[in-house]
Image: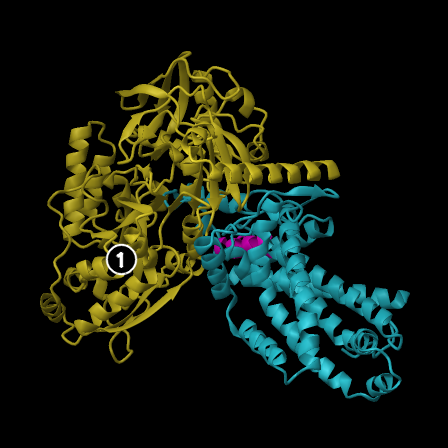
Amino acid sequence: MTLAYHRSAKNALLTTICSLALLALPATSSVAQTKTREVSIGLQAAITSMDPHYHNVGPNNSLVRHVFESLVHIDENQKLVPGLATSWKAIDDLTWEFKLRKNVRFHDGSPFTAEDVAFSIKRAPNVPNSPSSFATFTRSIADIKIVDSHTVLVKTTSANVLLPSDLAVVRIISKNVGEKASTEDYNSGKAAIGTGPYKFQEYIPNQRVVLKANFGYWGGEEPWDVVTFKMLTNPAARVAALLSGDVQMIETVPTADIVKLSKDAKYSLVDKISNRVIYVHLNQSTEKSPPFVTAKDGKPLDKNPFRDLRVRKALSMAINRDAIVSRVMEGKAQSAGQLLPEIFFGTSKKLKPQKFDPEGAKKLLAEAGYPNGFAMTIHGPNNRYINDANIAQALAQMYTRIGLDIKVETMPSSVYFTRATKLEFGFMLLGWGTESGEQGSAMRSLLATHDTAKGMGVTNRGRYSNAEFDKVLSAALVTMDEKKREAMIIKAAEMVMGDVGLIPLHYEFSTWATTKGLRYAARTDQYTLAIGLKPTN
Amino acid sequence: MFNYFLRRFGQSFLVLIAMSCIVFLGVFAIGNPIDLLVNPQADEIERVRATAALGLDRPLYEQYFTFLKGAASGDLGRSFVFGVPALELILSKMPATIELALFAMVIAVAIGIPLGLVAGLRPDSLIGRSIMAFSIVGFSLPTFWVGLVLIMFFAVQLGWLPSNGRGETTLLFGVPVSFLSWDGLSHLLLPALNLALFKLSLLIRLTRAQVREAVLQDYVKFARAKGLSQGRVIGVHILKNIMIPIVTVIGLEFGSVIAFAIVTESIFAWPGTGKLLIDSINQLDRPVIVAYLMVIVALFIAINFIVDLVYSLLDPRVRLGQSSGGGH
């Protein structure tokens, strides 16, 4: 013990002397070239496990992508690109064929084959104690047939057009290692053996993850030898870490610091539109007054105003989206007219953000029988989406302008989502990130008629229901032909947005700040990957 | 003496039971962890599966009794989020927090008591007044603000010390500590200073008040009249007699430093239990919240007990186990 202490103290002393000596030397650049190329990245969320199949949440899925890969990869714009599979196609409605990449090796040197694929897909939904499993992505799979060492057939129980994008989230692990391993073995690193560009070095919960380069990587060399991800959940601490040079990149720059950092020549800021839309669900589940919606004198209304298209439309017209984007979001957002920005699959070019028209909104309210408006409470979270509480306040001011009596109540997400799911609110500020990157699955969750048995409208907290729209959407979801399917999804989107099934506000931008000399390939899926971080020269 | 231990133990046990019950009800009242843990894109089957996997499908009293049964054998449940035993998770973060708290208390005691002494002996001098002014500042500034200022000054502007995290650790008697290497120490300095500032000011004020009271007492006058040196009067007669309230406060404050280093830990991303607790509350990770509070309550009980023992050493009039005890 004392020996270790002496040695490390000596090392520290040596390092200090060396770095002092380096400072004194004029030609430091040639010395710096031979140093290990290290980079540290500040993350906003805690990584809860290194087991790629333990917890299906964005931050984990993003981080394990360095060590483990999928059959199908997702590029910066959420387009599917070849990963461990070089190609895939649907042979018939119920069968997909994946051709696997040859000459890929795991970090322990063993070759990657079809056996590993079959094993990974079987393990993914069945990890003990998982708080959110990957079963959602593998539910449609009936069987996996190994044709030869580098070809697999995936049989589904019903036509699943989204299978490749589902499998993009399921990481491939080594069968040899995985058969005997538990989640703890992945956290300790014993079993954290994948095919990815980085190898596992260290994982300390709530603190950091350290990765080192995998020099035999099939996709070519990465620019970093060692990558450290630090979990800096406090936004001020994250910015301070960047300013003091402890990390070279941070994700989710707080809105208040964006202007300051963008003016500082020592840092570069990148942002990109994300797949997350901020929207409003109007509770249409009740015949009479929904919760927290009353006449101005506090008496209940004799019918639910949100069931009237004119009221829904008026509530959308009263919102000055451009003001929210420029004032509340400091320009780091874009006004929304549907559930995904136009660069995504199944989005309509015709659906533009609703124009701000308070006079028109008043007229529509009067036509619907509310010439003097009504009273309601806006409910929203205050620690889930970017500036969520401020958005709720801004909405309140805009609605007061068209003659409504508004109260605002925001709460931590731990309280908010439980109550929202129980439909305890009338007017709910919410957000939705579409991981599959196509509008069909977003509409299926948020707008299809609520029917948990069929998996339709699972998160439809507004309980909007439109039989005709349901028919078009359901047909689209099982159409295998890409072109036809996209046309049908667009048709469904135009129907439901015309009927104001929900009120879209804006798409969030994801932001990253790096020190000068680094460049991050910003992504729509909000992942922060060392794989996309390169030196500029 | 034995009776005294037994009574203390019984009381502590009841406190632990009551606390776990309150936390169980409290977390239940806040919300359903499933709404935060399960990916929003997941379907109903997955929600039902996760609810059952975490044991949340059973009635609350049943969950509570399962917990009590486990707790009796030392198992405080598994973290919903990390999937590892909650107690193990907390204990793995404990050394970092205790090291930070100890270091902060050492700073507070080593600076606070001498400054308090000076201010108490020379209350009207410039130095005495400056010390008091400093203590008022230290008292009234919010911890998170001081923390950010320290980071801006020492880490960002001067670049002397790192802004976050825990540095290199070395094993001392099997426990990882960071104060033995420069890298570790440099990471420790800022958060410890931030955490110490309030306690430091508290100790200055407390010591000063005690000293001012003590110097007027007859025994001090008598000691001076006897011609004892200034050093002996202060070191033996004054200091020893004012230590009882100071030890009480140090003991209690040490407990609160460990339990509530949350703000400092999150600003400096110090990987201790405070940061773990705040993250767990945000995620409604009940097993970790309950286990953490159990550990903290046990800690407070232990500290109070040690304080009582120290009393009896400092003041021969105090006897453990007698009804009125130290009277504090």
Please state the horizontal and vertical placement of residue A451, each as a whole percent of the image. 33, 47
Q: Secondary structure at mark 1?
A: loop
Quarter that holds the N terminus of chain A: top right
Viewer-closest of B41 and A228: A228
The reply, left or right, for residue A350 in relation to residue A16 is left
Q: Is residue B235 above or below residue A45?
A: below
**Residue range of the region highlighted in magenta in the rendering:** B275-289
Q: How packed is label 1: few (under 14 Cα within 10 Å), some, or many (20 or more)?
A: many
Assess whether residue B281 is covered by the magenta stretch. Answer: yes
The reply, left or right, for residue A18 in relation to residue A3 is left
Q: Amino acid at mark 1?
A: Met
Please state the horizontal and vertical placement of residue B252, each as a whole percent of the image. 69, 68
Assess whether residue A197 is covered by the magenta stretch. Answer: no
Viewer-closest of A508 and A371: A508
Instruction: Provide the chain ID for the residue under circle 1.
Output: A
From the image, give the main secondary structure of the stretch colored magenta. Answer: helix
The hue of chain B in the figure is cyan
Q: Is residue A341 above or below residue A88?
A: below
Please state the horizontal and vertical placement of residue A437, each as a whole percent of the image. 27, 38
The reply, left or right, for residue B103 in relation to residue A291 is right
Name the residue at 63% across, 79% down: B128
Task: Pick out the residue farthest to the top.
Answer: A148
Q: Is residue B196 visible?
A: yes
Name the residue at 21% across, 69% down: A399
Q: Which chain is yellow?
A: A
Quarter that holds the C terminus of chain A: top left
Residue topped by disc 1? A329
